[in-house]
Amino acid sequence: MNTDKSAPTQTVLIVDDEAPVRESLETLMEDYFVVLKADSGEKAVKSIHETEVDLVILDVMMPGMGGMATLDAIMRLPDPPEVIMLSATDSARLGVQAVKQGAFDYIAKPFDSRELLKVAEKALEKRRLQREVNYLRSEVVKLSGFSNIIGNSKVMQEVFRLVQQICNTDSNVLITGESGTGKELIARTIHSKGQRRGGPFVPVNCAAIPQELLESEFFGHEKGSFTGAHERRIGKFELAKNGIMFLDEISTLRQDLQAKLLRVLQEREFTRVGGGHAIRVNAQIISATNQDLRELVSERKFREDLYYRLNVLPIHLPPLRERKGDIPLLVRHFLERVAYRLNRKVSDVTPEAMEVFQSYQWPGNIREMENLLERLVAFSSDQGTIDVQDLPNELVFPDPDGSGGAITGSKGLLEARDRFEKMYILSALRKSGWNQSEAARALGIHRNTLIKKMSAFGLSSRQG
């Protein structure tokens, strides 16, 4: 048994009609778990509906809804907790029946305290592993389809349509969009649903590899071809055989390598550095960039002929500020994923906090949102929701130029004051059920003052 008594996170429900038994079990378990109690099967099922319970310690013999009937009702729930049955009768038949109905174990009274704690620990470990397996299975399912790309907006529906069409082709694809919009995620979706899903997906970040090593990374090298080449090395193009090669940040590729890449795309073959043997290319090329390649072409920083070779099938991913209708979906998606991974119970954000999320410009796009939510969940008080006061200043009081920083200067101070006042009043109104008199008392102002401020900020009960 884990002896860390500082912060119990798992919840145990003790169900027994005898008060002394309930008290005894609570004393035994309260150092390790959050303990709930119920004196009947009916109350136990109601408690599980209202609160997330990880383990139930359930007495078999109870008046009214007996232990076996309660066990049956628990097992019918969508995500039932583990159940340990307790009985004054040491009956093998009853124990077998309980396990068949879904109980983790069956223990006869009087029980050994250490044995019960050990069985409880094993039951909770089983639950943890099962939930982890379920989560991983769901992630695998997501990766095989479009459900890992979140969005109901019109622009994202157009992206889904293009991806679906591209999955049925073998042509080169160019994905454009700002940093953090999910370009690699789109490329991996094309791979998982496309004709080459049985082959490898080989990502290459052109900006992350030293320029002097890029040619060797792309094409491989023969032993002794340059200083330090102590053995033959297979390049990315060979590794991507029958699959997809993903060239991220393609705009950073230097001019001489652009020429070599163009030749490979034209001739569909290459040679390793220091080699003389031509190797056929059998890979679909998906490139991505956060730069405007057409502008780079006009500035003679990117080859025009290579641009047209790469841009056979274009996909543009819009920035998050242009798809604000998707923000609630994305927030809840990342919140669920991060909270599960960090084993926290944060489940939602308040309407006021969501309004801040939707008004923020998100210069770092989806990546910025995911990182922020991970930070908020990690630092949360585990109260179940994230509110405005949990958010960093740069979100609540963004710079008017859209850069994402906190607002500054005299104009910024006025905007910050108005924004805070609006959010504060809106929160009071929602908490009072839009009862203006009650909200005014909570705010410490006259009702007429509240009505004037509501009019100035454009607040009405339709926003509730």
Image (cartoon, rainbow, N blue to C red):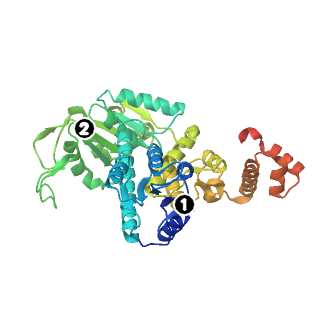
**How many labels sit on residues?**
2
* Mark 1 element type: strand
Label 2 belongs to which residue? 243
Image quadrant where one finds the N terminus: bottom left
> Seen in the image, is 89 located left or right of residue 150?
left
**Of callouts 2 and 1, which one flags the residue occurring earlier in the amino acid sequence?**
1
Image quadrant where one finds the C terminus: top right
Instruction: Decide: is 374 above or below 118.
Output: above
Label 1 belongs to which residue? 36
Between 121 and 57, the one nearer to me in the picture: 57
- Residue 312 in the image: x percent, y percent? 35, 29
- Residue 189 in the image: x percent, y percent? 36, 37
Amino acid residing under circle 2 = Gly
Residue 115 in sight:
yes
Which residue is at 35% across, 44% downward? 137
- Residue 108 in the image: x percent, y percent? 38, 62
Residue 250 in sight:
no
Amino acid residing under circle 1 = Leu
Determine the image quadrant of residue 187: top left
Dots 2, 1 in contact, CB < 8 A: no
Between 352 and 199, the one nearer to me in the picture: 352
Which residue is at 57% across, 55% downward? 384
Which residue is at 32% across, 43% downward? 247
Nearest-to-viewer mark from 2 and 1: 1
Instruction: Decide: is 202 above or below 123.
Output: above
* Mark 2 element type: loop
Q: Residues within 10 Å of mark 1 (few under 14, many from 20)?
A: some
Which residue is at 30% across, 30% downward? 171
Between 176 and 10, the one nearer to me in the picture: 10
- Residue 339 in the image: x percent, y percent? 48, 54
Between 36 and 449, the one nearer to me in the picture: 36
Inter-mark Cα distance, 2 to 1:
54 Å
